[in-house]
Amino acid sequence: MAPVTIRLRQASGYLHAVQFVLASQSPARLALLRSAGLDPAVFVSGVDEDAVAASLTDPSPSELVAALAAAKAEAVLDEVAAAHPDAVVVACDSMLNIGGQMVGKPANPDIARQRWAAMAGSSGELLTGHAVVRLDGGTRAKDTSGWESTTVRFGTPSAAEIDAYIATGEPLHVAGGFTIDGMGSWFVDGLDGGHTSVVGISLPLTRRLLAEVGVSVVDLWRPPAS
């Protein structure tokens, strides 16, 4: 199925077809958006997250994830504009605040094991930054950003369970070294906040940000199958 487009209505009638673009290689974000009725075009930013973080001066956790999301959106704008001059680009970045330390994806199994040793039986704050840019005729028309925080209450897996989980490879590719929509969910006791934010993109926040750039999410939904 071709990616869904919408038409934005102005006083004079329909003006431009607008393409929804996800600036992320995350299969979890893409699957969530598809399950929620969208069919995004995907553009991967390839941003050096460590370099972006290093360029910031003592950012707060929310400022850090928001800056990383904005950098990802900026990185794909030229490519998106060439392919879809009229588009809305959504980028996200997630990190886990555990014990006052902001952590992203574990670099290797040893780091993942250390993370789980710290997380087991405790709670962490999963922060997700969102950046939305509206393109009109290949030119930036509007942009906005936001972030959301969800408290994650971790269970207490055994050493053998942690080793088995790390052996799957899943925790090496996700912020904080765990998922809520995959095998990691066996080891999460509960959430205080938004479930979809922990998956990687908050649908309620994204809906509000889309509205700020003049796009109604209901117009993005795929038409019912005939």
Image: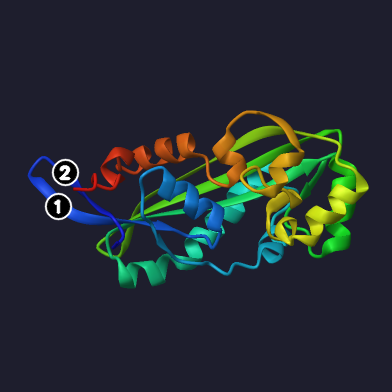
Left or right: residue 91 compared with residue 66: left
Label 1 residue SS: strand
Determine the residue positioned at 90% across, 52% down: 114
The residue pinned by badge 2 equals 9
Question: Is the residue 161 above or below the residue 87 in the image?
Answer: above
The front one of 188 and 177 is: 188
Q: Earlier in the sequence, mark 2 or mark 1?
A: 2
- Residue 179 shown left or right of residue 222 in the figure: right
State the residue lying farthest toward the left. 12
Q: Quadrant of residue 186?
A: top right
Residue 158, given in percent of the width and then of the height, sits at 90, 43
Horizontal and vertical percent position of residue 31: 48, 52
- Pick the residue in front: 38 or 67: 38
Residue 140 visible here: yes
Q: Secondary structure at mark 2?
A: strand
Bin the neighbour count of mark 1 within 10 Å (Cα to Cα): few under 14, some 14-19, many 20 and up.
few
Indicate the quadrant containing the N terminus: top left, top right, bottom left or bottom right.
Answer: bottom left
Residue occupied by mark 1: 15
Give yes or no for contact between labels 2 and 1 (Cβ–Cβ under 8 Å).
yes
Is residue 222 found left or right of 61 in the rendered image?
left
In the image as oriented, which residue stretches furthest toward the top? 192
Residue 115 seen in the figure: no
Q: Which one is in front, 4 or 81? A: 4
Q: Residue at x 27, y 60 (%)?
A: 86
Residue 109: percent from the left, percent from the top? Answer: 84, 62
Q: Give residue 80's position: percent from left, percent from top.
A: 37, 67
**Residue type at tag 2:** Arg
Label drawn at residue 93: none
Q: Amino acid type of disc 1?
A: Leu
Please, is residue 25 above or below residue 145 in the view? below
